[in-house]
Image (spheres, rainbow, N blue to C red):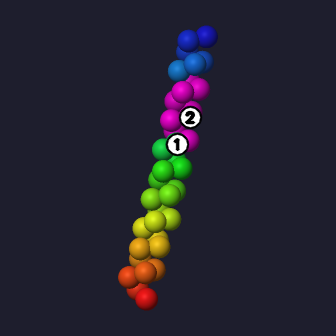
Amino acid sequence: MNFILIKEKHKIFKNKALKTTAQNKKYSNNEIQNNSQ
């Protein structure tokens, strides 16, 4: 039971980290586009 809980928490944390990474990529892509214009 406890192990499953930890696994779920880890999954949520991983998803948050992936979302943040995706947002950062999006942001840096926008920065590059703005600089090249």
The quadrant of the rendering that contains the C terminus is bottom left
Q: Amino acid at mark 2?
A: Ile
Q: Are marks 2 and 1 in contact (CB under 8 Å)?
A: yes
Q: Position of residue 3 (x, y in %)?
A: 55, 15
Q: Residue at x 47, y 62 (%)?
A: 25
Identity of the residue furthest to the left in this view? 35
In the rendered structure, the answer to whether residue 8 lies left or right of residue 29 reads right
Q: Which residue is mark 2?
A: 12
Q: Nearer the viewer, residue 31 or 6?
A: 31
Q: CA distance from mark 2 to mark 1?
A: 6 Å
Residue 9 image-quadrant placement: top right
Please, is residue 9 above or below residue 15 in the view?
above
Badge 2 element: helix
Q: Residues within 10 Å of mark 2 (few under 14, many from 20)?
A: few
Please, is residue 21 above or below residue 10 in the view?
below
Please, is residue 29 above or below residue 24 in the view?
below
Q: Residue at x 56, y 34 (%)?
A: 12
Q: Position of residue 1 (x, y in %)?
A: 61, 10
Q: Residue at x 52, y 42 (%)?
A: 16
Badge 1 element: helix
Classified by dominant secondary structure, the portion drawn in magenta counts as: helix
Q: Which mark is residue 32?
A: none
Chain part drawn in magenta: 7-15
Q: Residues within 10 Å of mark 1 (few under 14, many from 20)?
A: few
Q: Which residue is mark 1?
A: 16
